[in-house]
């Protein structure tokens, strides 16, 4: 069964680009939801849980790091996979976000190959 | 040390990475005397602070911005693309180019923290960070579109 996904980014353009790139990578998806920041994402997930969240880091309102912390503080979402998508590329930062409970990290700018490589393990 | 960094090369390499990866657009440098910006333009800027403080500004004509947005979104330039989407796309370009610069200068300059990008449209737009700021300014041709990059910085 295709996985449901949520795209969290304050840029609608970036959400469209990510979606287009996922399709270009040949990955099939189920339901797709979108949110403009971490707070909106949490509200929507509470109403309609998803399998995978792709989340920006630097957003107005609730950023990606706080989103991961809050999501992981609720055991109901232990099976929700969170992939961060960001221009932030420092190894220390990436390690810290993964330690908070993110399951993967995609650096911007990205290619269909880098999206596929990161997402594929969670698509089965 | 800021003096260890050649911001010209850093800016060009960072911009090339973003435009080639996300938009499949090749970047070619243009001499300032050959660069004639459209009057109607979009200016996207994003500020940073930390080891350096300053601003990256990217300016181009409205039609050129539409072409860039179309390439980002996988659309044709003649497709209907809203000004909101064009500004949003330009903001993402500035966000990604600054992210790429940040990665390239981290070892020599140190860490910087980046703001949320902002894009405005208008006529003859320009940016300044005061008289004491250093600036690296580059004009590039992107598949026929002229784009101006300005990297303003002050050493902290």
Image: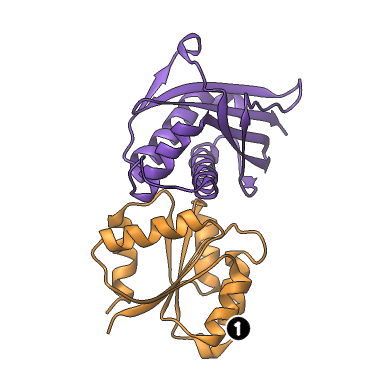
Chain colours: A orange, B purple
Provide residue B64's location: percent of width, then percent of height. Answer: 44, 32
Which residue is identified by label 1?
A73
Question: The disc numbered 1 marks a residue on which chain?
Answer: A
Q: Quadrant of residue A50?
A: bottom left
The quadrant of the image that shows the N terminus of chain A is bottom left
Provide residue B94's location: percent of width, then percent of height. Answer: 53, 41
Q: What secondary structure is found at the residue carrying circle 1?
A: loop
Query: Please, which residue is most extreme toward the right here?
Result: B131
Q: Nearer the viewer, residue B90 or B84?
A: B84
Query: Please, which residue is most extreme toward the bottom here?
Result: A76
Is residue B5 visible from the viewing direction of this image? no
Image point 56% across, 59% down: which residue? A10
On screen, residue A120 versus residue B98, left or right, reads left
For the image shown, how many numbered marks are present on the structure? 1
For disc 1, the neighbor class at 10 Å (few under 14, some 14 to 19, many from 20) is few
Q: Nearer the viewer, residue B109 or A105?
A: A105
Provide residue B72's location: percent of width, then percent of height. Answer: 39, 46
Image point 48% across, 21% down: which residue? B139
Is A43 above or below relative to B104?
below
The quadrant of the image that shows the C terminus of chain A is bottom left
Q: Quadrant of residue B20?
A: top left
Query: Please, which residue is most extreme toward the left here?
Result: A26
On screen, residue B75 versus residue B115, left or right, reads left
On screen, residue B128 versus residue B63, left or right, reads right
Is B109 above or below relative to B124?
below
Is residue A49 visible from the viewing direction of this image? yes
Provide residue B21's location: percent of width, then percent of height. Answer: 34, 43
Is B22 above or below relative to B155?
below
Q: Nearer the viewer, residue A68 or A53?
A: A53
């Amino acid at each position: 069964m295709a996985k449901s996904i949520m795209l969290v980014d304050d840029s609608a353009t970036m959400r469209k680009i990510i979606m287009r790139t996922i399709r270009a990578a040949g990955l099939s998806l189920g339901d797709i939801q979108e949110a403009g920041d971490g707070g909106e994402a949490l509200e929507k997930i509470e109403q309609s849980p998803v399998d995978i969240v792709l989340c920006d880091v630097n957003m107005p309102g609730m950023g990606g790091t706080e989103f991961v912390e809050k999501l992981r503080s609720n055991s109901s979402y232990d099976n929700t996979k969170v992939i961060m998508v960001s221009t932030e590329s420092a190894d220390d930062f990436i390690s810290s976000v993964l330690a908070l409970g993110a399951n993967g990290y995609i650096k911007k700018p990205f290619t269909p190959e880098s999206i596929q490589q990161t997402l594929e393990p969670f698509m089965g | 040390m800021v003096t260890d960094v050649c911001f010209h090369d850093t800016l060009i390499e960072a911009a090339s990475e973003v435009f080639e990866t996300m938009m499949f657009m090749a970047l070619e440098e243009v001499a300032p005397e050959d660069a004639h910006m459209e009057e109607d333009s979009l200016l996207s800027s994003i500020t940073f602070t930390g080891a350096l403080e300053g601003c990256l500004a990217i300016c181009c004509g409205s039609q050129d911005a539409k072409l860039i947005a179309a390439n980002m979104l996988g659309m044709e330039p003649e497709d209907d693309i809203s000004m909101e989407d064009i500004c949003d796309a330009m903001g993402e370009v500035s966000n990604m180019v600054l992210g790429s610069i940040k990665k390239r200068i981290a070892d020599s300059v140190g860490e910087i923290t980046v703001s949320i990008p902002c894009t405005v449209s208008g006529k003859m737009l320009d940016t300044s960070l005061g008289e004491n700021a250093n600036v690296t300014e580059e004009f590039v041709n992107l598949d026929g579109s002229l784009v101006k990059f300005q990297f303003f910085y002050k050493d902290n």
